[in-house]
Image (cartoon, rainbow, N blue to C red):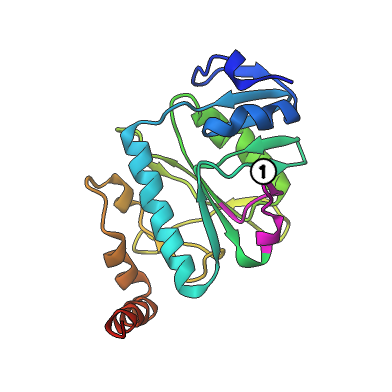
Amino acid sequence: MLQQKTLPLVRGVWYPMTWEEFLDWCDEGQSEWEDGKGIAYVSNDPRHIDCTEFLADLFRRYALLFDLGRVYTNQLLMRLPNRPSGRMPDIAFVRREHLDRVGDRWLEGPCDLAVEYLSDESAARDTGAKLTEYEMAGLPEYLPIDIRPRRHRFLFYRLDAEDRYQQVLPDDRGRYHSTVLPGLWIDPEWLWQDPLPDVGRLLMEIAPEAYRTYLLSILERNGAR
């Protein structure tokens, strides 16, 4: 069996391997597999990391408020049988009713919402092959986001009644609304800010009653100790 130590981890380089070999090779970080080849993403730039943690934190805390499911970053391997392929989105949200598909090594089938931050190496793949692949797999909402300097672009795709991706348009205030995370909206302007906004303040704007109740429950628990 192919051992990870025998292969150099060069970012953006594809290496031939079977799915079983890939499972041993991909343990050290964000990796993907397609068409009998694996690729490892050894590192990301600080802005990529910050934006991933920011949006994942927003999704995670919002999902916690309403008991909607779980949020994973970088390390959740998503096995898609239609190509077949194995993908690790920057952010993956899995609804509570689909958590039984999360196994010890991978999620069987698509997550319910995926975010990919575009890079020079991945942009064409994330907005081309993956867009088609995620649509065919039935992934309900897909957000390929470009945070590269002078290329700011926010794309939001949602499956329609015929299971085809349609581009979601913002409301009259420039905000994008999720149906997978009901009630959650995203303002792309958040992602262009440096520093990034405080997630707690955003939750007070998005879901003020639920977040206020949550904070009061924490205070009450702490006061009872």
Q: Position of residue 174 (x, y in %)?
A: 36, 58
Label 1: how many residues lie within 10 Å, few (<14), some (14-19) or many (20+)? few
Q: Does the magenta portion include 102? A: yes
Q: Which residues are magenta?
A: 98-113
Left or right: where 135 falls relative to 76: right
Q: Is residue 117 visible?
A: yes
Number of marks in picture: 1
Location of the N terminus (image quadrant):
top right
139 or 189: nearer the eye?
139
Q: Is residue 176 visible?
A: no
Q: Residue at x 39, y 59 (%)?
A: 58
What residue occupies the far left of the structure in this picture? 195
The answer to whether 200 is drawn above or below residue 90 in the figure is below
Left or right: where 140 falls relative to 144: right
Q: Which residue is identified by label 1?
A: 105
Residue 4 position by quadrant:
top right
Q: Position of residue 201 (x, y in %)?
A: 27, 66
Q: Position of residue 187 (x, y in %)?
A: 35, 57
Q: Residue at x 60, y 52 (%)?
A: 166
Q: Residue at x 50, y 62 (%)?
A: 178
Q: Does the magenta portion include 106? A: yes
